Amino acid sequence: MYVYSTEKENTTRFPALDQMTDNLFHLWEDHSKGSSTLTLASGFLSDEQFYIIFLFITYTSQLINSCAIITNSLSIAVFIKLGFSEPSNISLTTLAICDLSLAVLHTWSNLCFWMTYHNVRLPFHGANVTHLTGGAQWAFLSTTVAWITAFISFERCLCILVPLKVRRLITPRGTFVAMLIIILLTFCPSFFIYIKYKFVWDFNPYLNVTILNTIPVNSELAILFEKISVVICGVIQPLLAFSIVVTCTVLLVVQLRKISSWRLSVTSAKSQRVQPEENLAGISSVTEIRIPQKEERLVRMVVAIATIFIVCYIPTCVGLLCYVAFDEFNMFGVYRKLFIVSSYITSLGQPISGSINILVYYKMASKFRSVFRRLVRLDRQEQ
């Protein structure tokens, strides 16, 4: 049986959000009394500040999500027309599909919040059901995006470091298998959350109706499995993937500078009618820099994508570190409102990154730009 606290800080100014509170926060359980009470710990934010900030972030995130849905849908359509004979097309298509899925899941969460805020009677408990049908999947899928970006960056590093062997190492079939493995190891564990929670029909005293809700499975095995999955899939994997992306991006930038220096020295030597070999001093290896211009353009595009990902993913990494460092910085801690607000702010990085990628493809990939223009009929007048 649930016992709800009737004390609200702002029932006069935010009547609709009082009901949203029940859908947003889990109930605190008092095992000694055998009941649960709903309370709001202020932490660093008052209820009024929390509601205003949360409302603004939700509307902002939905605008960004809409852009991400449109841009990633166009990117997928272009990559399908380009075909999958190139390994890079397979990995970039998978990245676009994951970015699109992230935007859809985030939209679903925002939609549930809006309906609750506008007093729409939902046939389910907003926060709990949305968490199991969107929130958990979004968190794990964001890790999938991080690992796909890490794979793309690592693949381009191989093209620079071992250009003669990369064709045998990176094949379309191998890339496809790698994408499946990444998805299985990062996203599929999100469905194991149903071991810890299950759907039930529960009576809602506010609506005076029975609605779909979720309850935790109080077994030691389920609790242990949840803790392990949260630490491994929710903290270790994202931070490790971020470290790989940063490392590979730094290596790619260093190699691109070497290539630029080599070409500048060759151009200068030709203008002075000197053999180019005399100007190769200081270059670590000629094989490192003699890559086709097509591959170089692809490397530069990957560097741009990885850089955007790093910038947008830094707030998420900071949030994960705070989650590990501070015991009360979580959904059930004293600072849970600050945790929710910061989580929503950091979650904006994923749709922003997914929305910008298409601009990188259009600017730096001539084939993508050509197919994109034909797809949206921009070249119709020229033809």
Image (cartoon, rainbow, N blue to C red):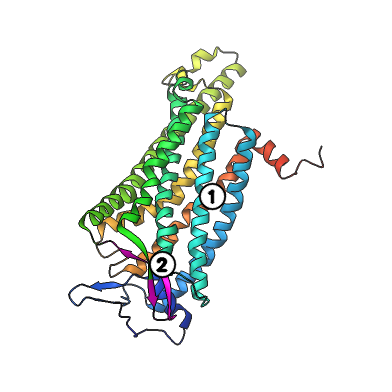
Dot 2: element: helix
Relative placement, left or right, of 265 versus 134 is: right
- Residue displayed at 60% across by 47% down: 73
Estimate how packed mark 1 is, as few (under 14), some (14 to 19) or many (20 or more) residues with alpha carbons within 10 Å: many
Q: Tell me which amino acid carries mark 2.
A: Ala
Whole-percent x and y of residue 36?
27, 76
Residue on which the image places disc 1: 100
Q: Nearer the viewer, residue 98 or 226?
A: 226
Q: Tell me which amino acid carries mark 1.
A: Leu
Estimate how packed mark 2 is, as few (under 14), some (14 to 19) or many (20 or more) residues with alpha carbons within 10 Å: many
Residue 173 counted in the magenta span = no
Predominant secondary structure in magenta?
strand
Q: Is residue 383 above or below residue 346?
A: above
Q: Quadrant of the C terminus?
A: top right
Instruction: Find the distance from the CA under tag 2 to the CA under tag 1.
Output: 22 Å
| Magenta part of the chain | 202-217
Whole-percent x and y of residue 158?
43, 26
Q: For residue 94, say whether it is visible.
A: yes
Residue on which the image places disc 2: 127
Residue 211 counted in the magenta span = yes
Q: Quadrant of the N terminus?
A: bottom left
Give the numbered dot on residue 253: none
Q: Are marks 2 and 1 in contact (CB under 8 Å)?
A: no
